[in-house]
Image (cartoon, grey):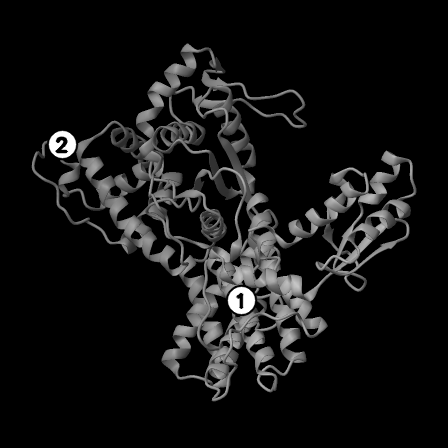
């Protein structure tokens, strides 16, 4: 289904062509003076140079051709050459009816559908999720849902950090605490226990303890390096411990991501890429891409026109050890083999921009990815406290994500109980739904690359540009629909959205018709905040219409039924958008 603005553009383009002017001059945009008109076309200004004619004369010619068309309520030429447009109420109402009957609101994307891998989440095993993991998870989840809604085949990959020194530290600390475990007995040949010798709570205490010890104790640090080497070379006992660490961690991670309403299609790990590294490195050496520099094996990735120095991409350090760049390149080898994607999107802290520039250039230069494969980096800023610094707990530590979710849900619960509108059990359940919306919307409404201040009081407000305000709008519509359904006398004919009877209704209808623009722009620009901006504008348009219109007191039953049908479409648009953003609305608030 074509976008509303595209349909209007086609008609105006035809008007230009019929007057003997270049068709492309007829592009229509939203008006920057909504007090004067709804849409505008500035093509006559560009046509003036082309046709050596005053723009107002070109605009006048086109307006004359367009006048009288049923699509337009008003169309006029304004100095120095603008074409101002107001569309007819019947045209808009008919368009919304088509939207109402269409799958996915008639939103569709032109062009070939892609296979897209979205790499987001990126937690390390043996560590709890903390506030630093929030943005990757919810931005990535929204991009996954949006891409899938538009018809693409999408694979969400958590890409776990499970390989490297952190594993050696945990194994060595466990060995010192429980030397009697069979994993550390080189002569042991039996089966290892099926149950892990630690809980998630113990595991999360072991890692920071081991990390701190390694900084103070050189001998322990050396043993941890040895343990890492033994693990990476397939030591049977260490591999068994590593599998326990993975199983316990992944189980806990899934539980916590579930609280965020975030899911992954695959749970790939850094270790999955390791088997691809030797052959990849060997090929890059044989084909002359890789060379030695200060003992390390590197690939040059600088390009002409670089404003800043882009260092070589390091494959192997001087001691033969791999780095994140090695693993990321090998992961691309694996992804090409398993999925042959058209696009890979990385949702990662923007401070890793240089790293991904190096990896992407190396992958392209060496043929690790196909020529047509798009590699995109969606870098996000930090979530800060009111002091402008990265968000911390009151005692200065990094807050666990589950505690942050609980804190915002508790704040919503307290607010609900102040009004005493529902019992405690329902209030707690509702607070979780609203709290998640407040948290996600509070984050996603900001441009991803920008830092923002986490402010619980502002986020949970039922007024302003917040998640609860959007939910309250949906709940208000549900309430009106329920009241209408309970009426004894209702319109018995086929209810349809009618041409707007007021300026606020027209504004609401036009805003509903812009959902495709918002979703397609959010996808093209990898910008979920555009969806937030749209549903905030739509909620404002609805609430203005609601306050100015006596819906339930309307005596004309056909018009009342038309109002309800319009409200149903508004609700459907809002619910579709918040589902893409990764939250839902309660039945009441």
| In this rendering, the label closer to the viewer, 2 or 1 | 1
Q: Is residue 128 left or right of residue 526?
A: left
Note whether 198 is above or below 586 in the view shown: above
Q: Badge 2, how many Cα within 10 Å: few under 14, some, many 20+?
A: few
* Residue 510 visible within the image: no
- Secondary structure found at label 1: helix
Question: Left or right: where does residue 110 sit relative to residue 61?
Answer: left
Distance from label 2 to label 1 (Cα)?
Answer: 67 Å
Measured as percent of width and height from the top left, residue 274 is found at 33, 29
Tag on residue 186? Answer: 2
Of residues 291 and 101, the one nearer the viewer is 101
In the figure, 525 relative to 412: above or below? above
Query: Residue 336: percent from the left, percent from the top?
Result: 39, 29
Task: Report helix, strand or loop for mark 2.
Answer: loop
In the depicted structure, whether residue 114 falls above or below residue 40: above
Q: Which mark is residue 569?
A: 1
């Amino acid at each position: 289904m074509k976008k509303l603005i595209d349909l209007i553009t086609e008609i105006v383009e035809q008007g230009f062509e019929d007057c003997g002017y270049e068709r492309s001059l007829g592009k229509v945009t939203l008006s920057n003076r909504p007090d004067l008109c709804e849409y505008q076309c500035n093509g006559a200004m560009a046509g003036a140079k082309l046709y050596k004619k005053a723009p107002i004369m070109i605009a006048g010619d086109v307006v004359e051709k367009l006048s009288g068309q049923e699509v337009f309520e008003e169309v006029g030429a304004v100095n120095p050459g603008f074409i101002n447009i107001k569309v007819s109420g019947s045209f808009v109402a008919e368009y919304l009816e088509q939207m109402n009957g269409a799958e996915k609101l008639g939103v569709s994307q032109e062009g070939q559908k892609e296979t897209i891998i979205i790499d987001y989440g990126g937690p390390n095993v043996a560590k709890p999720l903390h506030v630093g993991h929030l943005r990757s998870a919810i931005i990535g989840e929204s991009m996954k849902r949006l891409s899938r809604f538009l018809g693409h085949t999408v694979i969400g990959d958590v890409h776990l950090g499970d390989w490297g020194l952190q594993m050696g530290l945990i194994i060595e600390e466990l060995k010192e605490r429980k030397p009697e475990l069979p994993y550390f007995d080189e002569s042991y040949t039996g089966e290892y226990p099926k149950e892990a010798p630690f809980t998630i709570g113990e595991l999360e205490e072991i890692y920071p303890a081991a990390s701190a010890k390694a900084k103070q104790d050189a001998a322990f640090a050396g043993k941890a390096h040895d343990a890492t080497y033994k693990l990476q070379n397939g030591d049977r006992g260490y591999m068994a411990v590593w599998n326990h660490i993975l199983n316990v961690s992944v189980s806990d991670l899934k539980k916590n991501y579930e609280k965020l309403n975030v899911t992954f299609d695959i749970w790939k790990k850094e270790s999955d890429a390791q088997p691809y590294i030797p052959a990849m490195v060997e090929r890059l050496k044989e084909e002359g891409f890789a060379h030695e520099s200060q003992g390390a094996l590197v690939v040059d990735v600088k390009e002409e026109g670089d404003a800043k120095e882009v260092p070589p991409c390091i494959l192997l350090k001087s001691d033969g050890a791999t780095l994140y760049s090695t693993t990321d390149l090998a992961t691309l080898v694996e992804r090409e083999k398993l999925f042959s994607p058209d696009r890979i999107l990385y949702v990662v802290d923007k401070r890793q921009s240089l790293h991904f520039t190096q990896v992407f250039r190396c992958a392209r230069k060496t043929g690790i990815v196909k020529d047509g494969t798009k590699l995109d980096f969606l870098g996000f800023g930090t979530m800060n406290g009111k002091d402008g610094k990265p968000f911390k707990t009151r005692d200065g530590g990094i807050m666990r994500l589950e505690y942050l979710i609980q804190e915002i849900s508790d704040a919503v619960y307290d607010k609900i109980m102040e009004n005493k509108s529902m019992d405690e059990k329902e209030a707690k359940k509702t607070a979780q739904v609203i709290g998640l919306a407040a948290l996600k919307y509070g984050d996603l409404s900001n441009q991803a690359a920008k830092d923002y201040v986490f402010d619980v009081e502002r986020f949970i407000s039922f007024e302003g540009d917040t998640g609860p305000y959007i939910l309250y709008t949906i709940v208000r519509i549900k309430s009106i629909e329920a009241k209408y359904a309970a009426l004894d006398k209702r319109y018995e004919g086929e209810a349809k959205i009618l041409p707007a009877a007021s300026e606020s209704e027209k504004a609401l209808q036009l805003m509903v018709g812009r959902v495709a623009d918002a979703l397609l722009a959010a996808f093209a620009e990898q910008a979920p905040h555009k969806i937030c901006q749209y549903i905030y504008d739509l909620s404002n348009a609805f609430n203005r219409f609601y306050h100015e219109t006596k819906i339930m007191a309307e005596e004309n039953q056909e018009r009342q039924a038309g109002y309800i049908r319009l409200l149903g479409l508004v609700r459907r648009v809002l619910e579709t958008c918040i589902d893409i953003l990764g939250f839902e609305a309660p039945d009441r608030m």
